[in-house]
Image (spheres, rainbow, N blue to C red):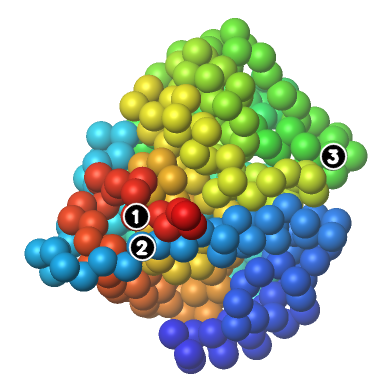
Amino acid sequence: MKEIYENARKLMKGYCRVCPECNGNACAGEVPGMGGLGTAAAFKENIKALHAIRLNMRLIHDVSEPDTAISLLGRQMALPLLAAPIGGVSFNMGGQVSEQAYIRAILNGCKEKGIMGCTGDGVPNFIHETGLAEIQALGGHGIAFIKPWADKELFEKIQKVRDTGTDTMGIDIDAAGLITLKQMGRPVFPRGIEKLRQIIQRSSMKFILKGVMTVKDANAAVEAGADAIVVSNHGGRVFEFTPGAASVLPAIADAVKGQVAILADGGVRSGGDVLKLLALGADAVMIGRPFCVAAVGGLQAGVESYIDKIRTELEQAMVLTGVKKASQVPGNIIFQSA
Ligand SMILES: Cc1cc2nc3c(=O)[nH]c(=O)nc-3n(C[C@H](O)[C@H](O)[C@H](O)COP(=O)(O)O)c2cc1C
């Protein structure tokens, strides 16, 4: 990964410093860019919440070849991992690679390694259009996330997503906080349970609501008929004042585990972090910024190397905690001080 990081540092100059630890400190306030909003407090909360968790090391057991595979929304995946939806290479990452080269690297790298890549949405339109074209080119292997636009645009985009051949899509409901879009004359806003139910039904795809940070919203997502939620504060880019995703995940999992698939993201930087979120109740985990760095720095090969790195770390962490299956991670691997 060293060469990939060095290359990314050059290509992302002025947008991402490719820090030894991607923690929101150096890039605070850089939105657009790769940072967290304002003081980046919500980005940093994601990191802090994961750091605060310690795992019980256990080595008297017979787990030497842990099984990292899971089944998510009807798809078999080699790892409990997805590349989070991220778009806007030109204004977030410096534009030294094209939107197409970037998203192609993400989607192909993920497919090659048996996981799923997601595509993002925004202004200008080519962000989602490029993502959708690449999902279509891969025969529907990818999950498109669109923003909670006004109805006309929303339903047009849902149709376009369906046309790609994918069977799963999502809305990042937390993007309702992006006032910049409203300023560009492209309003985004929250919807109530009834309206969401109509949207989900009309989509006739498996549907993910991304940006759930409370038990109340998790229950509402179930009621609206979502197939999955992503416990996420959008990497700290929409609202400065939220807790970290890992802090709210246990209560949300208590409330809705088994009723919807639970994904979570924010600050995940290693296979150990993936295991922590699974132990807190997630069924699968998304990683955001580090995938961008890998894709810009090394295109598809960079993405594949990054997935290999996470896989190796996850396997090590599973062996060192005695976890046999990523699909059944017990909560009691988390260290509780007496
Ligand atoms: C530059 C950038 C652009 C993003 N664009 C989108 C997007 O279009 N749709 C979306 O659902 N989330 C978007 N996100 C949020 C990510 O999907 C994800 O929730 C977040 O990056 C996870 O945190 P992490 O980067 O600390 O892993 C974006 C994040 C970044 C950093």
Ligand 1 contact, mark 3 (Cβ < 8 Å): no
From the viewer's perspective, is residue 219 above or below residue 51?
above
From the viewer's perspective, is residue 21 above or below residue 107?
below
Q: Position of residue 42 (x, y in %)?
A: 73, 53
Residue at 62% of width from left, 72% of height from top?
22
Q: Amino acid at mark 1?
A: Ile
Residue 156 in the figure: left or right of residue 179: left
Q: Earlier in the sequence, mark 2 or mark 1?
A: 2
Q: Amino acid at mark 3?
A: Ile
Q: Give me the C-alpha separation between circle 2 and circle 1.
A: 5 Å
Q: Earlier in the sequence, mark 2 or mark 3?
A: 2
Which of discs 2 and 3 lies nearer the camera? The answer is 2
Question: Decide: marks 2, 3 in contact (CB < 8 A)?
Answer: no
**Any mark on residue 223, and which?**
none
**Any mark on residue 56, and which?**
2
Residue ID for mark 3: 179
Question: Decide: marks 2, 1 in contact (CB < 8 A)?
Answer: yes
Residue at 77% of width from left, 37% of height from top?
177
Q: Give me the C-alpha separation between circle 1 and circle 3.
A: 41 Å
Which of discs 1 and 3 lies nearer the camera? The answer is 1
Q: Amino acid at mark 2?
A: Asn
Residue at 63% of width from left, 85% of height from top?
9
Q: Earlier in the sequence, mark 1 or mark 3?
A: 3
Image-quadrant location for residue 157: top right
SS label for mark 3: helix
Q: Nearer the viewer, residue 260 or 84?
A: 260
Residue ID for mark 1: 333
